[in-house]
C-alpha cells in the first residue's frame, strides 16, 4: 500500500489530527506543543528478557513501568539481527537491503537517505544522542556531514540542560549494554539466581552457560537503570507525559544461534511504548511491528511529512487505539534479513551469509541464498582470527566448541554452527524454539510455497538486490572494521 493511501485509510494525516484536537493540536498561546521523543535502544538486548514478559530472573522495573503505563508489544522485530543495518533501518524508516553499503555491519550510510533525527531538527526539534546510536562504522565515508542520530551529548541530563526553552526534543538514549564482553560471574555476584534462569531451547544447559546468561542479565539490568534515571529526569522537568517514549534493543542477545540469525532469538525484540494520556495504559498488542516503522511514527507524531521513500508504516493508529491484541489487521507478518556481519567466511572471501525471512504468528520461513557458506562463519578463518567469527566470543561459545562431541551439546552445536539448507520452515505453534526444520515435509508443502511466494513478492516490490540479481554487491562493499581481531561492536 502506498504511504499516502495508508494514511488516508488510517485517518492519521497530521492535519486531521490537529483539527480534531488530537496529539498534534496546539492550544492558543501555548507555544510549540508538539510531543518530545525519547528513543531508548540497548545493544544486544533480546525478547523476552524483561519482567513484563514474565522472565523469571531478570529485573527490569523501568521497562515494566513503561509497559504498565503504556503498551507492551509481543511481536516487535528488527529488520536485521546486526547492529549497523538494524540502526540504519531504524533511522531511515527503510528496509536495510535498500540502503546500499548500509545493509552491512561496520559500514556507512549514504547522505541520500533521509534520517528522522535530522528531518526533525529541520522542523524545529532539538535533537541529539548519548553513547551508541548510529553504527558501528564511518558515517562520513560517503560525504555525510552530520551524525545520522544527531549531535552527541554527555548524557540525557546534559541534553536537557542545553535544550532551548520551549523547543520540543528528540533524543536517542543509547548504550553498550548488554553487549559483550561481560565480567565473569558479575551476574551471580549481583544476586542473579542462575538455577532459576529459563535458558533458550537452543543453548546447552550447563553451569557455564547459566553464569554467562546471568552476566548478560546483569548488564540488561544496568541498562534498565539508565532508562529509569531518564524517566526521573523527565518527571522533574514536568515533561514525562508530553514525551513519546520507546524502549527496545537492536538485535538478539550475543549467544550462539541468536544475534546474527533470523530465528526469533536474533530478530525478536522487546518493545514498550508510553505517551502520557495519548496512549491507553496497560495494553498488550500482538500486531507485528518492524523497526523501520519507528521513523515514520516519530515524524507523524511531530506533524512532519514522511518522505515517500520510507517503507515503514507509522504506528500511530496502533498507539492511539484503545484495543489490545490484534489492532491493525494488515500487521499480520514481518520480514527480516541479513547480509554481511563480519568477513567470517573462508579467506580470502569477504562475503557474508545472506538470508531473508518472513514471520507470521504461526510460521517462520527462511531463505538462505548461499547455503554453501557458513551461517556463523567458517570453522577456520584467518581474516577475523577466530573460528565461527560471526558468533561473538564468550564463555558459552567456548563451552560449546570444547564440548561439541558431548551428546548433550552435539545437537545445539550443529544448530548454531553447522551449514543449513536453502530453505527452512518452522511451525512456531508446535516448535516455539524453532529447532525442527519442516521445509521438506509433505504436510507443510503448501505453507512453504505460500510463504516463499509472499516473501519473494515483497522483496521484489521493495527493490531487494538479492532477488533482482545484484545481491553480490553486498559482498563487495568495504568492511570498515578491523579484520584480524574481534572488536566490540
Image: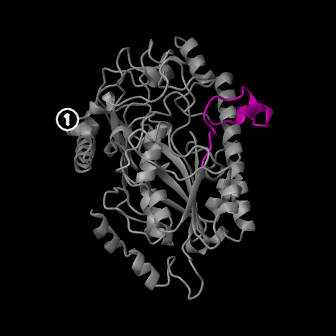
Q: Main secondary structure of the magenta part?
A: loop
Q: Position of residue 273 (x, y in %)?
A: 56, 61
Q: Is residue 366 above or below residue 307?
A: above
For residue 297, what is the image quadrant?
bottom left
> Could you tell me which quadrant the N terminus lies in?
bottom left
381, 337: nearer the viewer: 381
Q: Position of residue 260 (x, y in %)?
A: 46, 33
* Image position of 110 (left or right of 268): left
From this viewpoint, is residue 249 visible? yes
> Which stretch did the figure color magenta?
172-198
Q: Secondary structure at mark 1?
A: loop
151, 409: nearer the viewer: 151
Q: How would you rate the neighbour count of disc 1 (Cα within 10 Å): few for under 14, some for 14-19, many for 20 or more?
A: few
Which residue has dot 1 on it? Answer: 469
Q: Is residue 418 above or below residue 227?
A: above
Q: Position of residue 31 (x, y in %)?
A: 58, 81
459, 198: nearer the viewer: 459
From this viewpoint, is residue 315 visible? no
Residue at the spot 66% in from the left edge and 68% down from the top edge: 240
Residue at the spot 36% in from the left edge and 28% down from the top edge: 353
184, 93: nearer the viewer: 93
Count how many numbered circles sit on residues in the image.
1
For residue 275, what is the image quadrant?
bottom right
Residue at the spot 61% in from the left edge and 59% down from the top edge: 67
> Could you tell me which quadrant the C terminus lies in?
top right
Residue furthest left as drawn: 469
Q: Position of residue 430 (x, y in %)?
A: 43, 41
Q: Is residue 383 magenta?
A: no
Residue at the spot 66% in from the left edge and 42% down from the top edge: 220
* Image position of 25 (left or right of 143): right
Q: Is residue 421 above or below residue 72?
A: above
* Image position of 51 (left or right of 390): right
Amino acid at each position: 500500500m502506498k504511504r499516502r493511501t495508508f494514511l488516508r485509510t488510517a485517518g492519521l494525516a497530521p492535519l486531521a489530527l490537529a483539527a480534531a484536537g488530537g496529539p498534534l493540536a496546539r492550544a492558543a498561546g501555548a507555544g510549540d506543543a508538539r510531543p518530545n521523543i525519547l528513543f531508548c535502544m540497548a545493544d544486544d538486548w533480546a525478547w523476552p528478557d524483561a519482567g513484563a514478559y514474565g522472565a523469571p530472573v531478570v529485573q527490569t522495573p523501568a521497562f515494566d513501568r513503561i509497559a504498565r503505563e503504556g503498551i507492551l508489544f509481543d511481536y516487535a522485530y528488527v529488520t536485521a539481527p546486526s547492529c549497523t543495518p538494524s540502526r540504519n533501518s531504524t533511522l531511515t524508516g527503510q528496509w536495510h537491503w535498500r540502503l546500499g553499503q548500509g545493509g552491512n555491519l561496520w559500514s556507512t550510510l549514504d547522505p541520500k537517505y533521509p534520517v528522522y533525527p535530522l528531518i526533525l531538527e529541520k522542523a524545529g526539534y532539538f535533537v541529539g544522542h548519548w553513547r551508541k546510536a548510529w553504527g558501528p562504522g564511518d558515517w562520513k565515508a560517503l560525504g555525510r556531514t552530520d551524525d545520522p542520530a544527531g549531535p552527541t551529548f554527555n548524557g540525557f541530563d546534559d541534553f536537557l540542560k542545553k535544550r532551548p526553552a520551549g523547543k520540543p526534543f528528540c533524543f536517542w538514549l543509547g548504550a553498550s549494554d548488554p553487549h559483550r564482553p561481560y565480567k565473569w560471574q558479575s551476574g551471580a555476584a549481583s544476586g542473579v539466581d542462575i538455577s532459576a534462569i529459563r535458558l533458550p531451547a537452543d543453548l546447552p544447559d550447563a553451569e557455564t552457560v547459566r553464569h554467562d546468561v546471568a552476566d548478560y542479565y546483569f548488564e540488561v539490568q544496568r541498562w534498565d537503570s539508565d532508562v529509569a534515571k531518564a524517566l526521573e529526569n523527565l518527571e522533574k522537568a514536568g515533561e514525562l507525559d508530553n514525551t513519546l517514549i520507546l524502549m527496545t534493543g537492536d538485535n538478539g542477545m550475543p549467544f550462539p544461534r541468536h544475534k546474527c540469525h533470523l530465528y526469533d532469538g536474533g530478530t525478536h525484540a522487546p518493545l514498550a511504548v508510553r505517551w502520557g494520556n495519548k496512549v491507553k495504559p496497560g495494553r498488550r498488542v500482538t500486531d507485528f511491528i518492524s523497526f523501520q516503522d519507528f521513523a515514520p511514527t516519530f515524524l507523524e507524531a511531530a506533524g512532519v511529512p514522511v518522505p515517500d521513500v520510507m517503507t515503514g508504516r507509522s504506528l500511530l493508529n496502533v498507539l492511539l487505539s484503545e484495543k489490545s491484541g490484534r489492532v491493525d489487521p494488515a500487521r499480520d507478518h514481518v520480514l527480516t534479513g541479513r547480509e554481511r556481519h563480519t568477513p567470517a567466511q573462508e579467506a580470502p572471501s569477504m562475503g557474508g551469509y545472506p538470508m531473508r525471512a518472513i514471520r507470521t504468528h504461526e510460521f517462520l520461513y527462511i531463505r538462505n541464498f548461499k547455503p554453501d557458506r557458513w551461517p556463523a562463519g567458517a570453522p577456520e578463518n584467518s581474516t577475523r582470527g577466530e573460528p565461527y567469527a560471526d558468533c561473538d566470543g564468550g564463555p558459552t561459545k567456548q563451552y560449546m566448541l570444547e564440548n561439541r562431541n558431548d551428546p548433550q551439546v552435539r545437537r545445539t552445536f550443529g544448530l548454531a554452527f553447522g551449514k543449513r539448507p536453502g530453505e527452512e520452515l518452522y511451525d512456531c505453534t508446535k516448535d516455539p524454539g524453532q529447532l525442527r526444520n519442516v521445509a521438506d515435509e509433505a504436510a507443510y508443502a503448501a505453507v512453504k510455497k505460500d510463504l516463499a511466494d509472499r516473501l519473494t513478492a515483497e522483496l521484489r516490490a521493495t527493490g531487494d538486490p538479492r532477488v533482482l540479481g545484484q545481491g553480490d554487491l553486498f559482498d563487495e562493499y568495504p568492511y570498515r572494521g578491523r579484520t584480524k581481531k574481534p572488536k566490540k561492536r
